[in-house]
């Protein structure tokens, strides 16, 4: 599931007429980067939630699916259904009938061009019994205090002396968004808007969230300045083997 329903207030005026996930980075819409990475790794069923300027994202997803045979993109239309975005946990709960027993979640406005959405990661997570596995990153300047700790055993920690920033990338088990963990009715027919962090913290306190630190390129494209800086940086040399 790719989260793409937010208003992007900090990106104004760029997001007044364009949803943030469709802003271009290095010649491609932000959301296209993870869509291509997921498809290349064999994850061919995507769900995208929308609200602000959702019709533009609907058109983009339909066009992308048409150009990528064997891939499907299902849109969870929060703006059309309720008139507002349901936040992260609310949006995932709304889309739950469209998702499998285990699924990726990531934000459509985070630039992580080298992240590996691997089948091995999914297999390890499925065998772990954890409710979630999240990727953390070194703290960027705009979040110096971080979000979650990481124990030597690889568990995410609600309380820790050293905290890292949540990358927005994670593997989740659908049980986390069902009772008794989540109070939202599965499918979220009432349109409850709820953030993900409190739900994650409850699971962390029960020792049911694992984590690892990702040190590759990662940018939360949250302001026009960050977008400009990202486009101004030279692209790193390709690490792909010669053809």
Image: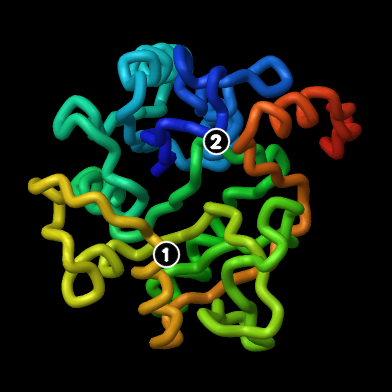
Q: Is residue 146 above or below residue 158?
A: above
In the rendered view, how is the structure colored? rainbow
Q: Residue at x 17, y 61 (%)?
A: 184
Q: Is residue 95 above or below residue 136?
A: above
Q: Residue at x 86, y 39 (%)?
A: 239
Q: Secondary structure at mark 2?
A: loop
| Label 2 – label 1 distance at C-alpha | 18 Å
Count numbered badges in the picture: 2
**In terms of image quadrants, where is residue 238?**
top right
Name the foreground residue: 194 vs 169.
Answer: 194
Q: Is residue 74 above or below residue 146?
A: above
The dot on residue 18 is: none
The dot on residue 109 is: 2
Q: Position of residue 178 (x, y in %)?
A: 20, 66
Name the foreground residue: 9 vs 77.
Answer: 9
Q: Position of residue 240 (x, y in %)?
A: 82, 36
In-image side of 68 versus 49 (left or right): right
Q: Where, quadrant-wise, is the N terminus in this rendering?
A: top left
Q: Position of residue 68 (x, y in %)?
A: 47, 19
Q: Where, quadrant-wise, is the C terminus in this rendering?
A: top right
Q: Residue at x 28, y 55 (%)?
A: 194
In-image side of 173 versus 34 (left or right): left
Q: Secondary structure at mark 1?
A: helix
- Residue topped by disc 1: 197
Q: Residue at x 18, y 77 (%)?
A: 180
Q: Position of residue 190 (x, y in %)?
A: 9, 48
């Amino acid at each position: 599931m790719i989260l793409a329903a937010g208003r992007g207030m900090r990106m104004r005026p760029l997001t007044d007429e364009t949803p943030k996930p469709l802003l271009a980075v290095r010649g491609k819409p932000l959301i296209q980067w993870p869509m291509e990475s997921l498809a290349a790794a064999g994850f061919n069923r995507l769900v995208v939630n929308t609200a602000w300027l959702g019709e533009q994202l609907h058109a983009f997803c339909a066009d992308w699916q048409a150009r990528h045979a064997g891939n499907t993109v299902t849109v969870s239309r929060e703006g059309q259904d309720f008139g507002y975005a349901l936040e992260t946990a609310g949006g995932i709960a709304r889309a739950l009938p469209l998702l499998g027993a285990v699924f990726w979640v990531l934000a459509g406005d985070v630039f992580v061009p080298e992240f590996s959405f691997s089948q091995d990661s999914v297999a390890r997570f499925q065998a772990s019994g954890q409710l979630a596995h999240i990727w953390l990153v070194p703290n960027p300047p705009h979040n110096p205090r971080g979000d979650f700790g990481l124990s030597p055993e690889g568990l995410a920690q609600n309380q820790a002396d050293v905290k890292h920033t949540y990358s927005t990338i994670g593997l989740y088990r659908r049980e986390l968004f069902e009772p008794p963990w989540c109070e939202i009715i599965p499918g979220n027919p009432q349109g409850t808007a709820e953030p993900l962090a409190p739900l994650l913290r409850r699971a962390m306190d029960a020792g049911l969230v694992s984590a690892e630190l990702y040190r590759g390129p990662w940018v939360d494209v949250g302001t026009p300045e960050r977008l400009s800086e990202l486009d101004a940086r030279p692209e790193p040399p390709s690490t792909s083997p010669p053809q």
